[in-house]
């Protein structure tokens, strides 16, 4: 079942999976977004000898595919494992938004502004489309 458009946050809690299971789940998530299936990455119990490296590489390919094909509605976001959270998910990049010339952070710039990034004194950040439609928020 497709998840379009993707929502920011945790998709897979890494504590619940072995490395091979997590790789398979990342691949399955990418397939649910429309990536063609990867032959040999289907769940098999028990895992054949030497499968871990193949699954790890295939899951990295799936992450690359997700980042290249699902972020049209999630600007300044990226798919990745977050070691601090112990989770795989879609995460916002506050630094990426701050550094982009199409984002108004402080005062007007000489560019075509598409987004406004507000960062409060606690470090919380909210990205808005120019029409003040919230795109994402990070606490």
Image (cartoon, rainbow, N blue to C red):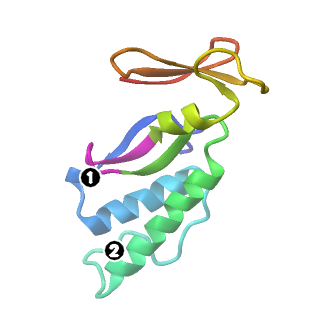
Nearest to the observer: residue 12 or residue 106:
106
Can residue 66 be spotted in the picture? Answer: yes
Instruction: Say the numbered circle drawn on residue 44.
Output: 2
Give the labeled residue for mark 1. 14
In this view, the mark in front (1 or 2):
1
Q: Position of residue 65 (x, y in %)?
A: 58, 59
Q: Quadrant of residue 5?
A: top right
Reply above or below: 29 against 127.
below
Q: Position of residue 45 (x, y in %)?
A: 27, 74
The stretch of residues the image draws in magenta is 82-90
Q: Residue at x 21, y 52 (%)?
A: 16
Tell me how far mark 1 sits from mark 2, CA to CA.
19 Å
| Number of residues whose C-alpha sits closer than 10 Å to that of mark 2, classed few (under 14), some (14–19) or many (20 or more) | few
* Element marked by disc 1: helix
Q: Quadrant of residue 131?
A: top right
Q: Position of residue 106 (x, y in %)?
A: 59, 17
Reply above or below: 79 against 74.
below
Q: Residue at x 58, y 36 (%)?
A: 99
Nearest to the observer: residue 5 or residue 101:
101
Q: Is residue 19 left or right of residue 8?
A: left
Nearest to the observer: residue 67 or residue 93:
93
Can residue 5 be spotted in the picture? Answer: no
Give the quadrant of the C terminus: top left
Q: Residue at x 20, y 51 (%)?
A: 15
Give yes or no for residue 126 being in the magenta stretch: no
Q: Mark 1 vs mark 2: which is more N-terminal?
A: 1
């Amino acid at each position: 079942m497709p998840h379009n458009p993707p929502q920011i946050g945790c998709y897979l809690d890494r504590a619940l999976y072995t490395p091979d299971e997590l790789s398979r789940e990342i691949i399955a998530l990418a397939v649910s977004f429309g990536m063609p299936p990867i032959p040999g990455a289907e769940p098999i119990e028990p895992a054949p000898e030497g499968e871990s490296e193949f699954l790890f590489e295939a899951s990295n390919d799936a992450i690359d595919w997700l980042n290249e094909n699902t972020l049209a509605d999630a600007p300044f976001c990226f798919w990745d494992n977050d070691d601090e959270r112990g989770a795989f998910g879609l995460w916002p990049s506050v630094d990426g938004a701050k550094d982009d010339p199409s984002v108004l952070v402080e005062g007007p710039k000489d560019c075509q502004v598409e987004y406004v990034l507000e960062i409060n004194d606690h470090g919380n950040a909210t990205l808005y489309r120019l029409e003040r439609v919230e795109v994402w928020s990070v606490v």
